[in-house]
Amino acid sequence: MSYRELHNSRINKKRKSRGLAAFVKIFITIFWVLFLLLNTWTESIERLIYLHTFGFRWISKPDFLSFLNFNDFTVIHPEFIKIKLGHFIGFAVLDFLLFNLIKRHKYSVCISIAFAFLTEILQLFFGRDGRLYDIMIDSLGVLSVFFILKRLKL
């Protein structure tokens, strides 16, 4: 085998491994987005957590003013911390996956926060409480990953 053939074979192997790595990154990111959407669409997050069941209920005319409701923020039930921590971690992971895929902080942060807004609005259509403060919690998760990655100079 000549030097040129050996060199071309190495280049082809690198291209294949990069293509496979990109496919895996895309697959994991899509899987995570679908996981977040499942949590958005399910009628009761508590049923999903404890009974491992989910149901869908479509509301064609949701109460959009409830999006601005902050009164229930003070009502802390046993699952409150778990659910809000899930918001924080879920969107932190999304931002990390997006950054790992596209390598641009600005784009990964914008896409993650836009997706957080979309999921909260969609919750209103699925009989759930979409809240502005949940977007703030999601955004804190996104921004924490942003600052950690900046600190690590990635």
Image (cartoon, grey):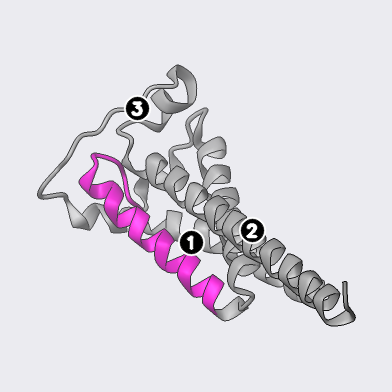
Find the residue positioned furthest to the left: 61
Rate crowding at label 1 as few (under 14), some (14 to 19) or many (20 or more) other CA atoms within 10 Å: some
30 is within the stretch colored magenta:
no
Q: Can I make out residue 143 in this image?
A: no
Mark pair 1, 3: CA separation: 26 Å
Q: Secondary structure at mark 3?
A: loop
Residue 49 image label: none
Q: Is residue 131 toward the left or the right of residue 13 in the image? A: left
Q: Which quadrant of the view contains residue 147?
A: bottom right
Considering only order in the chain, which callout, 2 or 1, is on the residue closer to the N terminus?
2
- x then y, percent, for residue 64: 20, 56
Quick check: marks 1 and 3 in contact, CB under 8 Å? no
From which residue to which does the magenta span run?
Answer: 107-131
- The quarter in which the C terminus is drawn is bottom right
The residue that appears at 17% across and 51% down in the rendered structure is: 63
Q: Is residue 120 toward the left or the right of residue 147 in the image? A: left
Number of labelled discs?
3
Considering only order in the chain, which callout, 3 or 2, is on the residue closer to the N terminus?
2
Q: Which residue is mark 2?
A: 20
Q: Nearer the viewer, residue 81 or 104?
A: 104
Q: Can I make out residue 112 in this image?
A: yes
Q: Amino acid at mark 1?
A: Met
Q: Which residue is mark 1?
A: 136
- x then y, percent, for residue 120: 35, 54
Q: Secondary structure at mark 2?
A: helix
The residue that appears at 25% across and 33% down in the rendered structure is: 56
Q: Which residue is mark 3?
A: 54
